[in-house]
Image: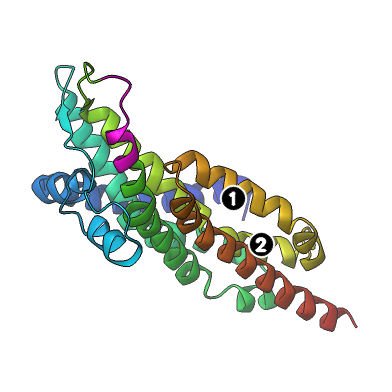
Amino acid sequence: MTFLEHLEELRWHIIRSLIAIAVFAVLAFLMSDFVFDQLILGPSRKSFISYRLFCQWAGLLCEGPQQLEVFTQKLGEQFYMHLKVSIIVGFIAAFPYVFYEIWKFVKPGLLEHERRVTRHVVAIASVLFLLGILFGYFVILPLAVSFLAGYSLSNVIANTVTLSSFVNTVVMVTLPAGVLFQLPLVVYFLSKIGVVTPDFMRRYRRHAIVVILIVAAIITPPDVITQILISLPLILLYELSIYVSVVVYRKRRAQNS
């Protein structure tokens, strides 16, 4: 294929991906009651399932978050947030298909053994992304909302929040977690091309743990137990990435010997 033919092929992959996102976005737009009342605003209520589980398992957040009054500040804010949330939910729901379209575009350029090695990449990436989204939504977000809603400088200051601010908090906590959970997959490919080795990851394990603890301290309340609850899955994710790198490194060494 010529360069222009490649661009034409890429254009159709992008178009199909956008159509999939649009379909799920329209469904999310029509299901606004469920999306906003149950998903977006769910962590702002004491009845949210994560608060009950944290209280039952770790004795944390038993009182839930302080009552939040969510309001709009600008004309049309509810409509714009409705559109924004619908598009984001559409992207999350369509992620497996979008990644599949990207994979279809990349696949013809791979060698036969590379295709065999990466044949399950779409399923693995989709599962990791979903796990990250769930972890961010059910673990990190309730902790962040509970801390920020209860933080007060003075009794004179009313603790209210705009709809756009709350939506942005939900998005910035959940989406990065989905991306972060792609670490084992990224390490796998970097190990395949020799950029990352198990020795390199072991050598910088302490540095990685320190970074993880710092990040957990920033995004969670100043509580050691909460920080550990956040850090532990991320550390396990890093250890899993080391194991992935070991497997890839051994296979590469066996093929080269």
What residue sits 50% from the left and 63% below the top? 104
Residue 7 picture location, percent across and down: 54, 46
Residue 162 lies left or right of residue 13; in this view the side is: left
Residue 218 picture location, percent across and down: 50, 39
Q: Is residue 121 shown to the viewer in this render?
A: yes
What residue sits 78% from the left and 73% below the top? 249
The type of colouring in the image is: rainbow
Residue 251 picture location, percent across and down: 76, 80
Q: Amino acid at mark 2?
A: Val
Secondary element at image label 1? helix
* Viewer-closest of 104 and 247: 247
Residue linked to disc 2: 187
Q: Separation of disc 2 and disc 1 at Cα?
A: 17 Å
What residue sits 69% from the left and 78% below the top? 113
Highlighted range, magenta: 145-154
Secondary element at image label 2? helix
What residue sits 58% from the left and 61% below the top? 235
